[in-house]
Image (spheres, rainbow, N blue to C red):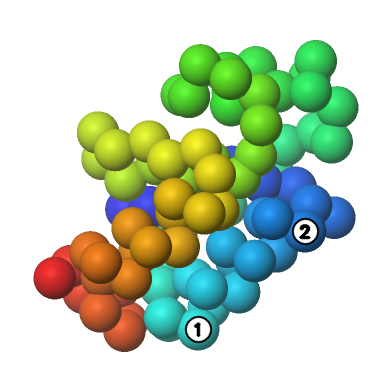
Amino acid sequence: MLTLYQFEDCPCCQTVRQKLSDMEMTYISVCVSPQHVERGAVRRVSGQSQVPVLVDGDTVLTDEQDIIPYLERNYARGGVRV
C-alpha cells in the first residue's frame, strides 16, 4: 500500500495527488502540518521534513519530480504493479 505524506495547500502535493487520482491509485494519505517543525512523522520515514513524501514498501521518495516518474514506471492504471 502506498502512503503519501502531504498537506492540502502544498502545490507539489496537489500535483502528486492528481497523478495518483489520474492513475486510479489507492493510497493512504497522511496529512501533516504546514509547519516543518511539526513534521515528526515525515522525518521518521524520510529523514527530512519536506513534502510530498511517498512510501512504497521499502522505497521512500521525497520529491514530486521523483514520485511521478516512479509511479509511471512502476504502476499501470488502477494501481497494478508493473
Residue 30 can be seen in this image: no
Q: Which residue is mark 2?
A: 11
Residue type marked 1: Asp
Image point (80%, 15%), residue name: 37
Q: How many residues crowd around disc 2 within 10 Å: few (fewer than 14), some, or many (20 or more)?
A: some
Q: Image check: 82 left or right of 34?
A: left
Badge 1 is on which residue? 22
Name the residue at 45% across, 54% down.
Answer: 67
Callout 2–callout 1 Cβ contact below 8 Å: no
Q: Is residue 52 left or right of residue 4?
A: right
Label count reads: 2
Where is residue 41? Give x, y as percent: 59, 23
Q: Earlier in the sequence, mark 2 or mark 1?
A: 2
Q: From this viewpoint, is residue 20 visible?
A: yes
Spot the residue most to the left. 82
Q: CA distance from mark 2 to mark 1?
A: 16 Å
- Give amino acid for label 2: Pro
Q: Point out which mark residue 58 bears.
A: none
Left or right, 35 with respect to 42, comes to right
Residue 51 appears in which quarter of the rendering? top right
Question: Among all residues in the image, which is located at the extreme front?
Answer: 65
Residue 68: image x %, image y %?
45, 62
- Which quadrant would residue 23 be assigned to in this image? bottom left
Q: Where does the image place residue 49, in percent across and percent down from the top left?
A: 66, 24
In front: 63, or 55? 63
Q: Secondary structure at mark 2?
A: helix
Residue 32 coordinates in the image, percent (x, y) = 72, 37
Q: Relative to 56, is 27 on the left or the right? A: right
